[in-house]
Image (cartoon, grey):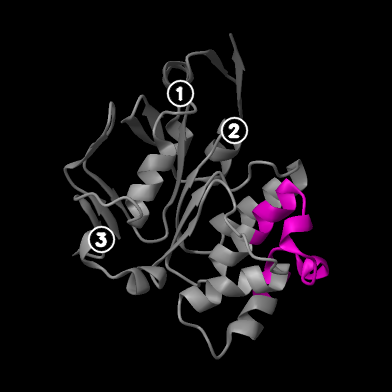
Amino acid sequence: MIELRNLTFKRGGFSIDVPDLTVEEGEKIALIGENGSGKSTLLHILTGLIACDGVHFSGRRLNGISRRERAGMIAFMPQLPSVVFPFTVFEVVRLGAYAAGYMKDADSLTEEALTDTALTELRDRAFSELSGGEKRRVMIARALNQRTGALILDEPVSMLDVRHSLEILKLLTGSGRTLIASMHEVNLSVNYFDRIWMMNKGKLIYDVPARDAEAAMLSEVFNVQAVSHTDHFTFRI
């Protein structure tokens, strides 16, 4: 369980303001909002990459948990890949197992992660030579390979084509793990997640069950005209 209590963060002229929230084990939450609304900053706070009081995992202050122990609890995928060494796909994904301390079984776990994410054919390719979408899938496989109870992912399906987006979301949301992911695809968020957090100018202004998302909320968050249809939303300016 993840608990947010009295969470505020300020840096320069930007601040994050989040009401008290509880994320139950296995819940799937989509975080949406305009570019620059604070989504990535909030995700960094939730992983401990930005130190901030008010985040608790299983009743423990996140700031009081060592980085090594956090790696066995939370897998984080940043918005931009940060692999700078000439690693193969297999080696990048194996880093996830290493991070969580699965040294002995790292190779077999990595093969499993590659199979789950349909990356087996790319296992020996250089990561640096992949397309943007392929790199995204590799980083998702790396996060999954940490075998943590919580996944915190920054735009996991950006740069993915339609089929791979659906396959990855089905895999992530069907994993049984707690999932918090920033998303730009509103209709995918509504269809694949349990709850939606909506951010506007650093404030988390709505926390609603995905099925209860309303056009008026989306219009406010994205500064557009959202129109609700039977099973999806459309947008216009």
- In the displayed image of the protein, which residue is found farthest to the top? 237
Mark 2 vs mark 1, CA separation in Å:
12 Å
Stretch in magenta: 112-138
Image mark count: 3
Q: Is residue 196 visible in the rendered structure shown here?
A: no
Q: In whole angstroms, how far apart are the C-alphas of marks 1 and 3?
A: 33 Å
Q: Residue at x 67, y 60 (%)?
A: 138
Q: Amino acid at mark 2?
A: Asn
Q: From what the image shows, is residue 136 above or below residue 73?
A: above
Mark in front: 3 vs 2: 3
Q: Which residue is mark 2?
A: 187
The amino acid type of the residue labelled 3 equals Leu
Question: Residue at the spot x=66%, y=73% of the render?
Answer: 91
Q: Cβ–Cβ below 8 Å for labels 2 and 1?
A: no
38 relative to 2 in the view: left or right: right
Against 94, is 13 above or below? above
Taking depth in this image into account, of 41 and 21 the one nearest to the observer is 41
Classify mark 2: helix, strand or loop: helix
Q: Position of residue 16 (x, y in %)?
A: 28, 34
Q: Looking at the picture, which amino acid does disc 1 mark?
A: Glu
Q: Nearer the viewer, mark 1 or mark 3?
A: 3
The residue beneath circle 3 is: 62
Residue that label 1 marks: 214
Earlier residue among tags 3 and 2: 3
Question: In the image, what residue occupies the spot 36% across and 24% down?
Answer: 201
Q: Residue at x 41, y 28 (%)?
A: 37
